[in-house]
Structure formats: C-alpha cells, structure tokens
Image (spheres, grey):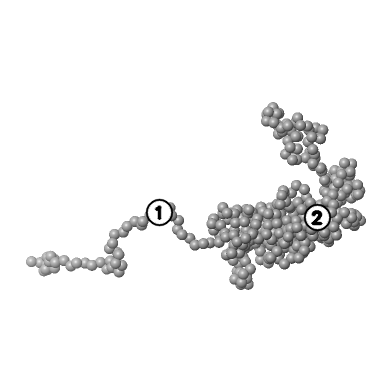
Amino acid sequence: MSLNYSAAHSSRITKKRTSTLKRSTSSPFATLARRQPIQRSKSKPEPSTYDDEDRFDQGLQDLGIVTTLVPHLPLKGVVEVVQYANSSMFEPMPERGGFSSTRIAEILNFRKSLPTTATVAHVHALSKSPTVTEKEIAQLAGANVLRKFIVPGRGTGASTVSESLVLFTDLETMLDRAEAVDATLKEKLLQHLRSQPLAQNISAASFHPSEISSLKRAGFLTSSIPRTNPSTHPTISSTHSTSLSTISRAASGSLAAVGGSAAIVEAGGTLGLRRSSAQYESPSPADRASDLQLGLPNTGPYLRLLTDARTHLISLIHQSGSFREMPMYLLRERWDGGTAGNDPVARAKKLRGEFAGVLPAKTRKWKHFWGMTFGWVLAECVGSGMVELFETGSVGLGVRVP
C-alpha cells in the first residue's frame, strides 16, 4: 500500500458549489413570462387641448357687425384721417431686427419714394358716416385743402384702389422734391391746379411740349388714351367677329390665329400702342390736342404694394378654416410673423439680451411689405368691403371674409 493513497481520493461525497456571480432580484414580477406590447388602434385620435393655432372649424360667436374703426381711433375730420393714414402705414425700424445696413437703407428709401396719399376706402374705414365723409371731401377739394386723384382700371366695385386723396400741402412737398421740374413749371402747375380744384384732366394746350415731357418724367402727368369704339374704328367692323371656324383656318403664329384685332377690343382692350421714351420728348399733335391725366410719382409701386398686402391678409384668414373667420389678435400675430410681442415678459427678455420669437428681418411683413402695420392693411380691407369685423363677446373682435 502506497503512502500517497488517502481516503480523500476514494470519497464519493461531493460539495455543492454556489456561483458568486448570480444575483437575486427584488422585483416580484421577475418570474412572470414576458409578453408583447398591445398594439392600440390609431383610428381614434387622442384628445388634445385647445390651441390658438387650431383651425376655427366651429365658427365664432357673432354679436353684431362693427362697420368702422372709429371707436378705437379718436380722429376728427378727413384731414386728420389722411394724416393718420400716411403716418401709420409703416412701423419704425426695430433696434434688433436682424437687418443689415444695406437692407435698412433700402427700406427707408422705398418708404420715402412712395406718395403721401390715402385711398378713399381707407378714409371711410376710419370715418363714422360715409355720406358725411363724401360731403366733407367735396368741400375740402373745392377749397384746395386736398385733392382727389383717380387711376382708371385699378379694381372694380368697392374693392377699387383707384381713388386716393392727397393734402394740397403734401402735393406741394412732392413737387418741391421733383428735381426734373424747374421752379417756374412747378408754380405754373400749382396755379393750374388751384384754378381747377375738381378737375382730373389737364388740357395739353395749356403747357408747352417740353413742359409736358418734364411733368411726365416726374410722374405728375400721364397720357389719357380714350377707349376705342369697335364700331367706329376704320379697320374693325361688325363682320370681324371672332369664331372658331375663322381661327382654325388661320395660319399658325398670325394675328388671326388668336382672334384678330377685334378680339382685343371685344375683351375690353384698346388699340393704342406703347410709346418709347424718345416719343415723350416730342408729343404728337394728337397728344397736344387731347387731355392729360393727373398723377402722382411712384403711384404704380404704391398700388402694387397695397393690392399685395390686401391679398396676403385675405389668404391668412382663408387658412383659419371653412368659416373664413378668426380673432383679430390671432390675425395680427400671423401678420407680424410670430415676432416677439411688447408684453412685460418679452420686454424683460430683451433687457437681458434674450429674444423669444422670430427676427423681424425673417418675416414676410418686412421682406415683402417693408414693415407695413397690421392696422393699416386692416383698414384698407374693411373700407373696401373685403373683410368685416364683428363682436365675439369672448375673444374680442373677429375678422371675417364675407
């Protein structure tokens, strides 16, 4: 028997080994079987709280139509209304608006170039009675306090933008700024306007051809081309009616293929040709014998800005829902583009150097409308009948597209 043999090698008793890496859990749900999460149906939307940006599909409560903005603006007389309309068209440049120096100069120069005028629709929106306002306009125009200018072919019905009012003092200021007109011609034009306070046209025989050219370049006169009558035109008669059979037999690319010259007149156009700048230097005898239309410098950009602002405001209301109405305060926020307000919280953030909202330079209000105020474009739409105001009783005034 070997001395190395011991009972340890022959023992059949084994010890149970426990792993020190196994940890026990304290959760009572550890032994339960795992299941897949339940897939809920998405057919029913989850309920959400009311938000100002929601669409107003239920409509607002109507407690009565508001026909004028006078209760909110203590204005007396047409002269004060015109002055207020000229001074409230644009907002002052914000201190921290994100504008470059070039853009600031562009905005200020554009504003300065526009005529200081107010449409008749704007004046009616800020007046109490249309009848009293029209009588006062006629009296002030006869006394050379203000003058009415008409641009034909700019809108129809109540939404027209063709009639505007200008204070005579503002007209004198615009004439003084016209560098293309000498002092003698300025005084001659003013005397002619004072002698005919209600006239819209000026006889071309009253001015020399060179004077007419200077006033046209400055924008104070335009050619007045009468509408041509198709029945009296030598090249157009009743036999030249537009028909599909005549157009189909015409050569491609010719005037007859689009209906001929009669189609232009039947559609409401005229047969007058556009003139070049060289022809303005020496007016034809027909121009000297006809009347000239009075105008204001940069009337085209002014009316284009006005019509675009109206259209944009109407589109904002159409986005509110099928009722085409929304509270005025929410419409103002959408016109401003979500910029920071003037409440105490926003002012406190500005003092701390913080800014909560969109920079004005990034909004459509400043990109396309040069900082036009909401109240100004709203008065234009109310006076022209494009929108109407009504009392809601809960959220202030409402704005509706009729």
Is the N terminus in the top left, top right, bottom left or bottom right quadrant? bottom left
Q: Position of residue 330 (x, y in %)?
A: 60, 61
Q: Give the labeled residue for mark 1.
A: 41
| Location of residue 23 by image quarter | bottom left
Q: Position of residue 200 (x, y in %)?
A: 83, 51
Q: Position of residue 261 (x, y in %)?
A: 75, 34
Mark 2 touching mark 1, by CB under 8 A?
no
Query: At 75% across and 56% down in the image, what residue appears?
Result: 120
**What's the residue type where badge 2 is placed?**
Lys
Q: Is residue 85 above or below residue 352?
A: above
| Location of residue 343 by image quarter | bottom right
**What's the residue type where badge 1 is placed?**
Ser
Query: At 70% across and 66% down in the image, what residue appears?
Result: 73
Query: At 57% across and 65% down in the image, what residue appears?
Result: 394
Instruction: Please name which of the two marks, 2 or 1, marks the residue nearer to the observer.
Output: 2
Please indicate, yes or no, whether residue 332 appears anywhere in the rendered image: yes
Q: Residue furthest left?
A: 1
Q: Give the labeled residue for mark 2.
A: 148
Few, some or many residues within 10 Å of mark 1 (<14, 14–19, 20+): few
